[in-house]
């Protein structure tokens, strides 16, 4: 859409330049001549063109980063999977150690959920750091997905793209 508006504005700019040149030799006694009108419109359309070019350049840089977003999301999800595996190992070791006390729990539940059941595991600094990284990664994944959704709107604004 902005590219279409830029094209129309460039056509207006060229048209006003040509008309300004065409009426340059005609003088009038009035306060505002046709030449002055076309000169003013030329300046206005030129400023609008420059503004649109700046906006388009900014938005194009955002759209250009779209291919990287999927790989970043995959990277954070892979890191979260490794963290879940590490926490699973720690919980299995802990459950083997405390088998008599917690015999009714099953490992079918999420390891992140099981950490909240055991205060001893929550106080473990390694598990705590991994949980913090896990939560931070989930927040980054969420923001990247929001950015990807916003890129759909930006592409539409730029060129009616999908």
Image: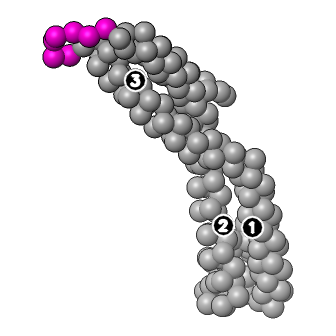
Q: Which mark is on residue 108? A: none
Tell me, yes or no, whether the two marked residues, 2 and 1, touch with CB atoms within 8 Å: yes
Mark yes or no: residue 108 visible.
Answer: no
What residue do we see at 64% from left, 84% from top? 128
Color encoding of the figure:
one colour
Rendered view: 5 above or below 136: above
Location of residue 134 by image quarter: bottom right
Kindly report the distance in space between the C-alpha atoms of the residues bearing marks 2 and 1. 7 Å
**Position of 90 compared to 135: left or right?**
right
Category of crowding for the residue at label 2, using alpha-carbon neighbours closer than 10 angstroms: few (below 14), some (14–19), many (at least 20) = some
Q: Which residues are magenta?
A: 26-32
Frontmost residue, 46 versus 27 = 27
Q: Going from the N terminus, do you reach mark 1 or mark 3 first?
A: 3
Q: Going from the N terminus, do you reach mark 2 or mark 1 first?
A: 1
Rendered view: 50 above or below 13: below
**Dominant secondary structure of the residues highlighted in magenta in the image:** loop
Q: Which residue is mark 2?
A: 137
Q: Which residue is mark 1?
A: 80
Mark yes or no: residue 24 visible.
Answer: yes
Magenta span contains residue 134: no
Q: Going from the N terminus, do you reach mark 3 or mark 2 first?
A: 3
What residue do we see at 61% from left, 27% from top? 159
- Residue 97 horizontal/vertical position (percent): 81, 91
What residue do we see at 65% from left, 58% from top? 141
Mark in the foreground, 3 or 2: 3
Asked which secondary structure carries label 2, the reply is helix
């Amino acid at each position: 859409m902005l590219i279409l508006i830029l094209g129309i504005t460039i056509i207006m700019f060229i048209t006003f330049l040509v008309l300004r040149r065409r009426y340059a030799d005609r003088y009038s006694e009035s306060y505002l001549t046709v030449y002055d009108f076309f000169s003013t419109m030329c300046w206005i359309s030129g400023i609008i063109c420059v503004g649109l070019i700046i906006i388009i350049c900014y938005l194009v840089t955002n759209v250009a980063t779209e291919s990287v977003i999927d790989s970043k999301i995959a990277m954070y999800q892979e890191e979260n999977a490794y963290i879940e595996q590490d926490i699973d190992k720690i919980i299995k070791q802990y459950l083997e150690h405390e088998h008599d006390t917690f015999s009714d729990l099953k490992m079918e539940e999420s390891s992140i959920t099981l950490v909240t059941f055991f205060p001893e595991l929550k106080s473990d600094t390694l598990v705590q750091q991994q949980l913090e990284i896990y939560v931070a990664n989930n927040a980054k994944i969420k923001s990247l997905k929001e950015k990807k959704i916003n890129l759909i709107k930006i592409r539409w604004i730029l060129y009616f793209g999908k």
